[in-house]
Amino acid sequence: MSHVTTHVLDAAAGRPAVAVSVELQDARGTVLGTGTTNSDGRVPELGPETLPVGAYRLVFDTGTYFARTSTPTFYPRVTLDFDLADAAAHYHVPLLLSPFAYSTYRGS
């Protein structure tokens, strides 16, 4: 399993956000892994199984997701920066999405 996982829920539609492209990057912007959300809004594999302690980011292509349904959005891309402080712990970073707002939290 990837050290960092995510899933995307479309809060406005009340369902998982399908086919959202996601990148896992290090602090310098180097892409460490890519994936696309499945029918459950999850990315089955996103990057390496282990990562060192440090700063990382997830970049979600929300503009393409909303464009498929001709839904205007204020956020064509969502970038979440976070610190991986425990190299042994799993990090799950969900995204709750709507066309004009988003929120996130550290999941389990």
Image (cartoon, rainbow, N blue to C red):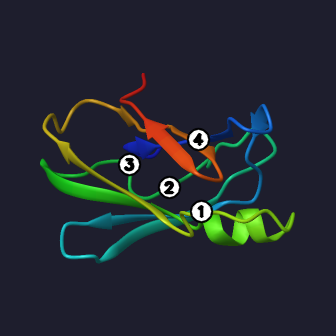
CA distance separating discs 2 and 4? 11 Å
Report if the CB atoms under discs 1 and 2 are less than 8 Å apart. yes
Please name which of the two marks, 3 or 1, marks the residue nearer to the observer. Answer: 1
Q: Position of residue 51 (x, y in %)?
A: 24, 52
Residue beneath disc 3: 49
Query: Of marks 3 and 1, which one's residue comes earlier in the chain?
Result: 1
40 lies above or below 28: above
Disc 2 + disc 3, Cβ < 8 Å: no
Q: Residues within 10 Å of mark 1 (few under 14, many from 20)?
A: some
The residue located at (19%, 43%) in the rendering is 84
Which of the marked residues, 4 or 1, is nearer the chain's N terminus?
4
What amino acid is at disc 2? Leu
Residue picked out by circle 4: 7
Q: Position of residue 16 (x, y in %)?
A: 75, 39
- For mark 1, what is the residue? 35
Going by the numbered disc 4, the residue's amino acid type is: His
Q: Residues within 10 Å of mark 2 (few under 14, many from 20)?
A: many
Question: What residue is pinned by disc 2?
Answer: 46
